[in-house]
Image: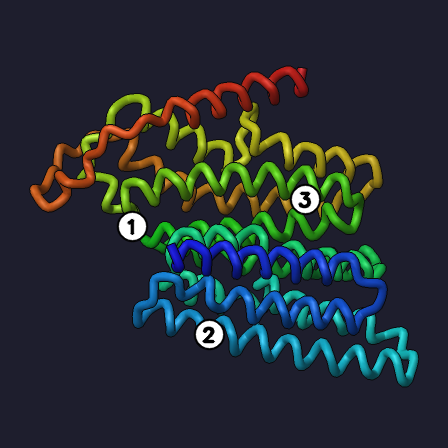
Amino acid sequence: MNLNLTKITFITLMMFSSMMAISSSNWLSMWMGLELNLFTFIPILNFKMSIYSIESTMKYFLIQAFASIILLMFMINKSLFFMIQVNMMMIIPLLMKLSLMPFHLWMPSMIEGLNWMSCFLLMTWQKITPMIMISYLNLNKSMIFIITLLSLNNLFGMNQNSIRKILAMSSINNSSWMLIAITMNENLWMNYFLIYSMLNMLMIYILWMYKINYINQLKFFNFNFFFKLNMLMLIFSIMGLPPMLGFLMKWMLIKTLIYNKMIMILIMLITTAILNLYFYLKLTYFLLFNFNLFNKWFIQNKKNNNFNIILFMNFFSLFFSSIIFY
């Protein structure tokens, strides 16, 4: 009971710190909100303490503290010397906090030691405050194009076997889309973020129920048809294939970029999305083909969980997105 109360307390403080940073009227208050968010998120990473979670927590703390120091230095220079160029430099520590290119290498390495709840919060909620702070910088479109160009570096996720690292690379890829969306329209970014968070929650829930951590574990499970259908629809949706719900969030941004005649940024985003389909398709390989490699150590994971709610949400999202596209 005390552990559950502790979890609720720290998660509530984490949400409060994010709201504090978002609703602040000056950069110093936003920075204080980021620091409070950091110190409330660190205990969440260690709810199930282990050697791997402690190592991941140290990596996260060092990176975030270093980014906070750089951000504070740029804020002091901006307030004292009124340097206009500081706006362009302040995006660097915020990109480090977001784990976006070229400051992304820390996230796939530290996410391996976290539990699934911490992974979900790191890939969704922890991106809200830095992205909104970036939207306040009034960056020009050339800077956004450079950020999009750097997103080609996330192709090293192709040779990954860990599902956590694959989802981390997916988060980095979608963060580049969300970064463009929040500079164009905040409502567009909010819709994208909500759909992306819902898809991640459903995917992580299934992986947590079956204790699946690596791709090759999928061949040891005797999955039924409905489980495979759920997984395939979720993977296709996260991939952004039409007419799934995941394509709807990207289609809204594509239309906005076309209306604003930002064709080069659109080409770069679509190119990186197509290249990233490879390591999504690896997840479907062991689901589509039955290898009949069952092991007695994995019999305990053959649960008869009821995924009717997730299946209903998948078909409802397919029906909803089909109506919008029509």
Residue 255 visible, this orientation: yes
The residue that appears at 38% across and 54% down in the rendered structure is 1
* Amino acid type of the residue tagged 3 in the rendering: Ile
- The residues bearing labels 3 and 2 have C-alpha atoms spaced at a distance of 34 Å
Q: Amino acid at mark 2?
A: Lys
* Mark 2 residue element: helix
Mark 1–mark 3 distance (CA, rounded to whole Å):
32 Å
Residue 283 spot, x, y in % from top left = 35, 40
Q: Nearer the viewer, mark 3 or mark 2?
A: 2
**Can you say whether 217 is above or below 165 in the image?**
above
Q: Are marks 3 and 2 in contact (CB under 8 Å)?
A: no
The secondary structure type at the circle numbered 3 is helix
Whether residue 89 sits left or right of residue 40 in the image: it is right
Is 6 situated above or below 232? Answer: below
Colouring chosen for the image of the structure? rainbow
Residue identifier under label 2: 59
Instruction: Return the residue at label 1.
Output: 214
294 in relation to 32, above or below: above
Comparing labels 1 and 2, the label whose residue is closer to the camera: 2
Point out the tag, 1 or 2, that comes first from the N-terminus. Answer: 2
Q: Which residue in the structure is indicated by mark 3?
A: 267
Which residue is situated farthest in the right direction here? 82
Identity of the residue drawn at 85% across and 74% down: 85
Farthest front residue? 1
Which of the two residues, 188 or 65, is positioned nearer the viewer here?
A: 65
Q: Residue at x 81, y 82 (%)?
A: 76
Find residue 317 and report its horizontal and vertical position in percent: 55, 23
Q: At which x and y percent is residue 66?
A: 60, 79
Q: Residue at x 64, y 72 (%)?
A: 35
The answer to whether any part of residue 158 appears in the image is no
